[in-house]
Structures are given as C-alpha cells and as structure tokens.
Amino acid sequence: MMVSLQDMGPESKVYIFPSSRKFYTDELPVLEKKALKFCKEFKGVKTFFELRYGRFLVFIVSELTVLDLDQHNQLITFIQDLEKEFQLVLLDKVNVSFKQGEYVQMKEIPDFKKLIKNKGVSVKTVVFDHMINTKYEYENAWEMPAGQSWLAHFFN
C-alpha cells in the first residue's frame, strides 16, 4: 500500500537503488507508473516511493512492517525486471554517486580516485551514501560532503 513520506516514522527502512545512468525523459513516467503500481500491490506493506535526481529509485517501508523473505524477494525481482526492461544496473551500490553542478554522476571507485588526484572532485563534493538504512538517515545523511563520508580517506 502506497503512503506518503510523512506517514513513515524515522526508523522506516530505506532501499536506494542507484541507476547506472540517468533515466531518459520518456522513461520517467513509465518507471514511476510501474513503481507506484508495485507499491500499491505490495500486500500488507506500507511503502513510499520516489524517484530522485532522475537517477535513484527510493523505496521506504514502514518501520511497523518487517519485510519477510518473500516480500524482500518481490522487491528485488521488481528491480531486476526494471534493469532488464530499461537496460541498466540498479543493484550495484559499490559505485560512487556524486554531484557535479546540477548533475549526478556515477563512477567506479578507481575512476573516482583518479578524479580526486586530478582535482575533478574535492572534499566538498556532495556524494550519496547508498548504504543508509532508515528514513532519518535518508533525510539527514544520504547526501554529504565527500570529506565527511566513507570516501574521506581517499583524500589523504
């Protein structure tokens, strides 16, 4: 069942799926329609969905609901189906997503290290932490300067 973000408590579980590429303009309404349909049909689960920066699929599940293995598998199967349909990767959370101006980029760690070396990014560059777990973290720590993130040691 689809609910609003305000209906989710701070300990609600967050699932962020970074896309290997920006979604094309014509894909956005199709993707949003599919995700909303999935949330509505996710039986017994209070879910919120949003598409951020044309690059991230964000699902939040109420802290009152702990996904069982079947429900978790439904979510992952849905994401895998999207990967096939849109020919992209959504399940790779190891790459670094960061802002460059108004754009969100994604690089593999070795390529991000090269950007650091070449001064293409700095400790002030905003990066995204896809490993956060709660709505509170999503609202307060998902986006942060690279120098305050797990990437900080690469700048030394």
Image (cartoon, rainbow, N blue to C red):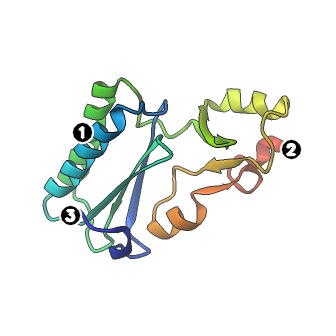
Question: In terms of sequence position, does the residue under pointer 2 or pointer 1 come before the other?
Answer: 1
Image disc number at residue 156: 2
Q: Which mark is residue 77?
A: 1
Q: Is residue 53 rendered to the left or right of residue 143?
A: left
Look at discs 2 and 1 and give the one toward the viewer. Answer: 1
> Residue at coordinates 33% horizontally, 27% vertically from top-left?
86
Q: Secondary structure at mark 3?
A: loop
Per the image, label 2 sits on a secondary structure element best described as: loop
Above-or-below relation of 128 to 26: below
- Locate residue 74, reporting x and y percent: 20, 46
- Kind of residue at disc 1: Thr
| Residue 143 image offset from top left, x and y in percent | 61, 56
User: Which label's residue is closer to the chain start, 2 or 3?
Assistant: 3
**Amino acid on which the number 2 mark rests in the picture:** Asn
Up-down relation of residue 95 to residue 12 (above or below): above
Residue indicated by mark 3:
45
